[in-house]
Amino acid sequence: MGKPQLQPHRPPTPNTPASVVQYDDSSYIDGMKVTALIPDDLVAEVRALAAKDNLTESLIVALREWAAIQKMRVLRNKIKSRPLVFAPGFTAQSVRALNRT
Protein backbone atom coordinates (compact mmCIF):
# COMPACT_ATOMS: atom_id res chain seq x y z
CA MET A 1 0.00 0.00 0.00
CA GLY A 2 1.40 3.39 -1.02
CA LYS A 3 1.12 6.75 0.67
CA PRO A 4 -2.31 8.36 0.37
CA GLN A 5 -2.31 11.18 -2.15
CA LEU A 6 -3.37 14.56 -0.82
CA GLN A 7 -5.49 16.69 -3.10
CA PRO A 8 -4.58 20.39 -3.27
CA HIS A 9 -7.22 22.65 -1.76
CA ARG A 10 -6.11 25.53 -4.00
CA PRO A 11 -3.68 25.72 -6.92
CA PRO A 12 -0.17 27.11 -6.44
CA THR A 13 0.23 30.85 -7.03
CA PRO A 14 2.72 32.19 -9.61
CA ASN A 15 5.15 32.98 -6.74
CA THR A 16 4.95 29.48 -5.25
CA PRO A 17 8.15 27.45 -5.80
CA ALA A 18 7.62 24.31 -7.87
CA SER A 19 8.43 22.14 -4.83
CA VAL A 20 5.76 23.76 -2.64
CA VAL A 21 2.09 22.88 -3.07
CA GLN A 22 -0.51 24.53 -0.87
CA TYR A 23 -2.85 22.20 1.07
CA ASP A 24 -5.45 24.16 3.00
CA ASP A 25 -3.32 26.32 5.32
CA SER A 26 -0.19 24.12 5.31
CA SER A 27 2.68 23.69 2.88
CA TYR A 28 4.28 20.34 2.12
CA ILE A 29 7.70 20.38 0.54
CA ASP A 30 8.37 17.17 -1.35
CA GLY A 31 6.38 15.30 1.32
CA MET A 32 8.31 16.59 4.36
CA LYS A 33 6.89 18.82 7.07
CA VAL A 34 9.14 20.03 9.90
CA THR A 35 8.36 21.36 13.34
CA ALA A 36 11.26 23.21 14.94
CA LEU A 37 11.74 25.50 17.90
CA ILE A 38 13.69 28.45 16.50
CA PRO A 39 14.28 31.69 18.42
CA ASP A 40 12.01 34.51 17.23
CA ASP A 41 14.92 36.90 16.67
CA LEU A 42 16.66 34.39 14.38
CA VAL A 43 13.47 33.80 12.39
CA ALA A 44 12.97 37.54 12.01
CA GLU A 45 16.58 38.01 10.85
CA VAL A 46 16.32 35.18 8.29
CA ARG A 47 13.02 36.52 6.94
CA ALA A 48 14.47 40.02 6.59
CA LEU A 49 17.68 38.84 4.91
CA ALA A 50 15.99 36.33 2.59
CA ALA A 51 13.31 38.83 1.55
CA LYS A 52 10.87 36.10 0.50
CA ASP A 53 7.08 36.00 0.68
CA ASN A 54 6.82 33.56 3.57
CA LEU A 55 8.80 31.74 6.24
CA THR A 56 9.04 28.49 4.28
CA GLU A 57 10.67 30.19 1.30
CA SER A 58 12.98 32.16 3.63
CA LEU A 59 14.11 28.97 5.37
CA ILE A 60 14.70 27.23 2.03
CA VAL A 61 16.97 30.12 0.95
CA ALA A 62 18.83 30.09 4.28
CA LEU A 63 19.33 26.31 4.29
CA ARG A 64 20.52 26.22 0.67
CA GLU A 65 23.02 29.00 1.34
CA TRP A 66 24.24 27.28 4.51
CA ALA A 67 24.72 24.02 2.58
CA ALA A 68 26.66 25.87 -0.15
CA ILE A 69 28.91 27.47 2.47
CA GLN A 70 29.61 24.06 4.03
CA LYS A 71 30.51 22.63 0.60
CA MET A 72 32.92 25.53 0.04
CA ARG A 73 34.46 24.89 3.46
CA VAL A 74 35.07 21.23 2.57
CA LEU A 75 36.59 22.24 -0.78
CA ARG A 76 38.79 24.86 0.89
CA ASN A 77 40.11 22.23 3.32
CA LYS A 78 40.87 19.84 0.42
CA ILE A 79 42.79 22.59 -1.39
CA LYS A 80 44.58 23.52 1.82
CA SER A 81 45.73 19.93 2.36
CA ARG A 82 46.80 19.55 -1.29
CA PRO A 83 47.48 23.02 -2.76
CA LEU A 84 47.67 23.84 -6.44
CA VAL A 85 51.22 23.70 -7.80
CA PHE A 86 52.13 25.58 -10.96
CA ALA A 87 54.25 24.00 -13.67
CA PRO A 88 57.94 24.91 -13.70
CA GLY A 89 58.53 28.10 -15.69
CA PHE A 90 54.91 29.27 -15.35
CA THR A 91 54.55 33.05 -15.15
CA ALA A 92 51.60 35.40 -15.43
CA GLN A 93 53.42 37.26 -18.22
CA SER A 94 53.72 34.10 -20.32
CA VAL A 95 49.99 33.42 -19.97
CA ARG A 96 49.13 37.02 -20.89
CA ALA A 97 51.35 36.78 -23.96
CA LEU A 98 49.72 33.49 -24.95
CA ASN A 99 46.22 34.95 -24.52
CA ARG A 100 47.08 37.97 -26.68
CA THR A 101 48.10 35.86 -29.66
Image (cartoon, rainbow, N blue to C red):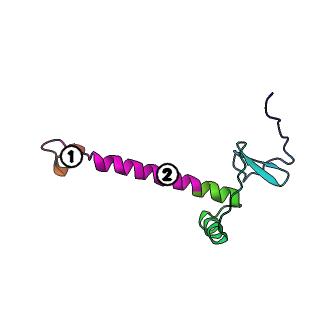
Element under disc 2: helix
Q: Which residues are magenta?
A: 63-88
In the image, residue 48 above or below residue 8: below
- Residue 30 lies in the magenta-colored region: no
Residue at left offset 39%, top offset 48%: 75
**Where, quadrant-wise, is the C terminus in this rendering?**
top left
Q: List the single residue furthest toward the bottom.
A: 41
Main secondary structure of the magenta stretch:
helix
Task: Give the spatial CA distance, label 1 vs label 2.
Answer: 32 Å
Q: Which residue is mark 1?
A: 95
Element under disc 1: helix
Residue type marked 2 = Ala
Q: Position of residue 27 (x, y in %)?
A: 76, 51
Residue type marked 1 = Val
Q: Quarter of the image holding residue 42?
A: bottom right
Q: Is residue 25 left or right of residue 66?
A: right
Q: Position of residue 50 (x, y in %)?
A: 61, 63
Q: Point out the frontmost of discs 1 and 2.
A: 2
Residue at left offset 17%, top offset 51%: 93
Q: Is residue 51 left or right of residue 72?
A: right
Q: Which mark is residue 68?
A: 2
In the image, residue 100 above or below residue 36: above
- Residue 83 lies in the magenta-colored region: yes
Q: In terms of sequence position, does the residue under pointer 1 or pointer 2 come before the other?
A: 2
Which of these two is toward me, 13 or 38? 38
